[in-house]
């Protein structure tokens, strides 16, 4: 008969291990993330500065974490966040135009190199418009900065694969004040910023958790 791998055990020990992993993972996420802020700005040329602060980390009913040496999976984790978006109205409009150009290029099937040049052109025009607008406002002593803060709650699945640096984030549920969000950015873009922030911060924590769990398992072997 084939030997049974120590990663997979029979009977009640599976439930015990999963319960331990869930408690351990949630405690680590709460300890390492709550109160922390991640600044997200994928393209500094056009994207606004988005500060995502993690207010609370919890789990939905049925939420759980499972662990093996190859994968750390956390399901139905809830992140309650505060999202502060910093940028002028002109910058935000330019960013929206550039993102729209990128989406349009993908829809019509333009190759990546051509699409990149097209988007770069839109970005340069947006930058020129922003620069001109800022100069005019500065001359007239207008306040140019725009800051909006919105609350965003998301339920996600997180998967950390062995030898993969970033945590994969799948947003399953997304709640915010849509009207407030749309005053600054589209809800889809807010969602993308929050997803990127969660991935970046959770990657640090998940790597640490996976290492700790692996060392513990090896110590027992």
Image (spheres, grey):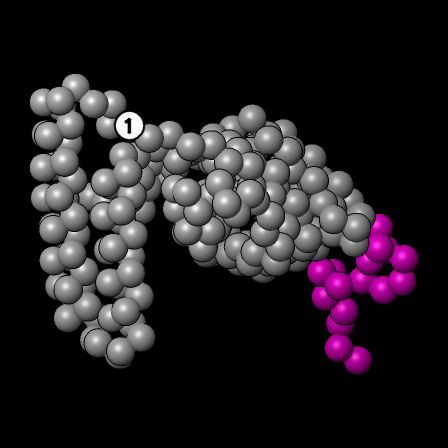
Foreground pick, 201 / 98:
98
Query: Measured from the top left, where is residue 210 in percent x and y?
Result: 59, 47
- Residue 61 showing in the rendered view: yes
Q: Quadrant of residue 157?
A: bottom right
Residue at 74% across, 60% down: 6
Vertical arrangement, residue 157 with respect to residue 150, above or below: below
Question: Which quadrant, please, contains the N terminus?
Answer: bottom right
Would you say residue 9 sits in the magenta stretch? yes
Magenta range is 1-18
Query: Measured from the top left, where is residue 97 in percent x and y?
Result: 25, 55
Query: How crowded is the residue under tag 1: few (<14 C-alpha within 10 Å), some, or many (20+)?
Result: few
Residue at 20% across, 43% down: 45
Describe residue 163's horizontal placement relative to residue 98 as left or right. Answer: right
Residue at 57% across, 44% down: 176
Describe residue 38's horizontal placement relative to residue 60 as left or right. Answer: left
- Residue 213 showing in the rendered view: no
Report helix, strand or loop for mark 1. Answer: loop
Residue at 42% across, 32% down: 148
Query: Measured from the top left, where is residue 85 in percent x and y?
Result: 39, 35
Q: Residue furthest front?
A: 140
Q: Quadrant of residue 3?
A: bottom right
Foreground pick, 137 / 47:
137
Foreground pick, 95 / 111:
95
Total residue callouts:
1
Would you say residue 219 sits in the magenta stretch? no
Would you say the magenta stretch is mainly helix, strand or loop?
loop
In this figure, which residue is indicated by the disc labeled 1? 145
Q: Quadrant of residue 79?
A: top right
Describe residue 113's horizontal placement relative to residue 106 as left or right. Answer: left
């Amino acid at each position: 008969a084939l030997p049974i791998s120590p990663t997979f055990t029979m009977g009640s020990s599976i439930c015990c291990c999963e319960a331990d992993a869930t408690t351990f993972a949630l405690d680590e996420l709460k300890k390492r993330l709550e109160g922390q802020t991640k600044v997200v700005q994928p393209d500094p040329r056009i994207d606004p500065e988005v500060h995502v602060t993690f207010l609370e980390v919890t789990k939905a009913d049925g939420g759980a974490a499972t662990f093996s040496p190859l994968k750390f999976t956390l399901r139905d984790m809830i992140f309650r966040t505060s999202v502060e978006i910093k940028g002028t109205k002109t910058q935000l409009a330019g960013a929206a135009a550039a993102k729209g150009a990128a989406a349009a290029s993908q829809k019509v099937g333009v190759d990546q190199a051509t699409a990149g040049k097209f988007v770069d052109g839109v970005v340069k025009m947006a930058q020129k418009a922003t620069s001109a607008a800022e100069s005019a406002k500065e001359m007239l002593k207008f306040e140019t900065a725009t800051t909006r803060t919105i609350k965003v709650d998301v339920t996600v699945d997180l998967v950390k694969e062995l030898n993969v640096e970033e945590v994969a984030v799948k947003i399953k549920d997304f709640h915010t004040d849509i009207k407030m969000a749309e005053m600054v950015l589209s809800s889809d873009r807010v969602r993308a910023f929050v997803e990127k922030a969660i991935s970046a911060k959770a990657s640090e924590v998940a790597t640490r958790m996976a290492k700790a769990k692996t060392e513990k398992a090896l110590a027992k072997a």
